[in-house]
Amino acid sequence: MRSLILFLTLAMAIPGLAQQKKRIAVLDFEYGTVQSNAAAIFGTNVDIGRGIRDLMVERFVNHGVYSVVERAALDAVLAEQNFSNSDRANPATAAQLGKVLGVDAIVIGSITQFGRDDQSRNVGGGAFGGFGAKYGLGGIKKSSAKAVVGITARIIDTDTAEILAVANGSGESTRGGTSLYGSGSLSGAGGLGDVDMTSSNFGATLIGEAVNQAVDPVVNELESYTDRMTHRVKEVEGLVADYSDGFVILNVGANAGVAIGGKFAIKRVVREVKDPATGQVLRKIEDDLGVALITEVDEVSAVGRFSGDGTPQVGDTAKLVE
């Protein structure tokens, strides 16, 4: 009983001891079936799958249930692996990417509905017992449209490519109008426009309202499945080989299990405690310098963006913490 009480006390005192955050990555959603609908709304071909991904990541980060790989790290791996748009919803490909990123699971998904829900009605055509129709006056056609969005998302195990959970979300704007987004068109590199779905301006549009209604329940449901993931903790330790302009180079790389997006605690040994009888080092006393977020990896080394109060030096220790 004393052991159980001690463990529970430590678990409450040390954040993350009882349950460490699972680390995930979210891929851009596949949107091929609704691409023409999106182009009609925005006036050009927009990568709405990337927009949905960014919105979900923002929600995940704000809620704090998962640790999420940042966009820059994900894009670097996607470019290196020659990832194509057709691979976005492929569990096997996603699992391979997840291993490279060193995450516990990866989220993939598809946009199944994105566009208008039109309702039309005639006003005045049947008045006076059909008088207007009889004399060719007809009625006044009034049209209103609501925005509707549907998405499906899946959590993929990075070891087995098994689908751990599926979540579906749908949204519909509470208002109607003749334009779901606004006037004008967008332009971007390679003929693709870009829409920031995380912005308040987008959220105020009809299509933005429907997108948010579809995304929120999916994020909430996926967060309830964290216990289905296996947290993979790697024991990786190395040394600082170089430090310049805010970046450290470590003497460990992919061969040791280092992946882009990993975080290393950078410390400096200030004192060694030795056994007075044998001279064996019993304990090393270290000062915390800061954290390095890994941005580049090869087989034998890694580069990380450093943040902290100290200044790293060659020979400082580096230990993977997340």
Image (cartoon, grey):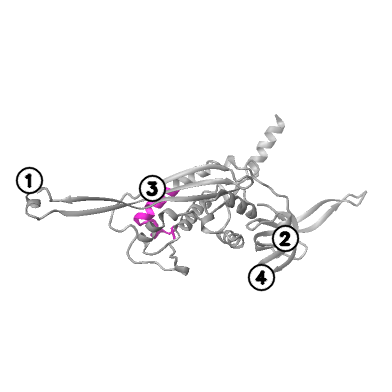
Q: Main secondary structure of the magenta part?
A: helix
Looking at marks 3 and 1 on the same chain, the residue that comes earlier in the sequence is marked by 1
Q: Earlier in the sequence, mark 2 or mark 4?
A: 4
Instruction: Choose the circle earlier in sequence order: 4 or 1.
Output: 1
Magenta extent: 196-215
Label 4 CA crowd tier, 10 Å (few <14, some 14–19, many 20+): few
**Secondary structure found at label 2:** loop
The type of residue carrying mark 2 is Glu
Label 2 crowd bin: few (<14), some (14–19), many (20+), radius 10 Å: few
Do the CB atoms of the residues marked 3 and 4 lie less than 8 Å apart? no
Q: Is residue 160 left or right of residue 61?
A: right
| Front residue of 180 and 129 | 129
- Residue 253: which quarter of the image? bottom right
- The answer to whether marks 2 and 3 mark residues whose Cβ atoms lie closer than 8 Å is no
Q: Are marks 2 and 1 in contact (CB under 8 Å)?
A: no
> Marks 2/4: CA distance?
23 Å
Label 4–label 1 contact, CB within 8 A: no
Residue 171 disc label: 3
Which three-letter amino acid code belongs to the residue tagged 4?
Asp
| Percent position of residue 240, x then y | 74, 63
Question: Disc 3 residue type?
Answer: Gly
Q: Residue at the location (78% across, 58% down)? A: 269
Identify the mark nearer the N-term, 2 or 3. Answer: 3
**Residue that carries the numbered disc 4 in the rendered image:** 245
Q: Which residue is mark 1?
A: 129
Q: Is label 4 in a helix, a strand or a loop?
A: loop
Q: Nearer the viewer, mark 2 or mark 3?
A: 2
Label 2, on which residue? 299
Which amino acid type is shown beneath numbered disc 1? Gly
Instruction: Give the distance between the C-alpha atoms of the residues marked 2 and 3, in whole angstroms.
Output: 45 Å
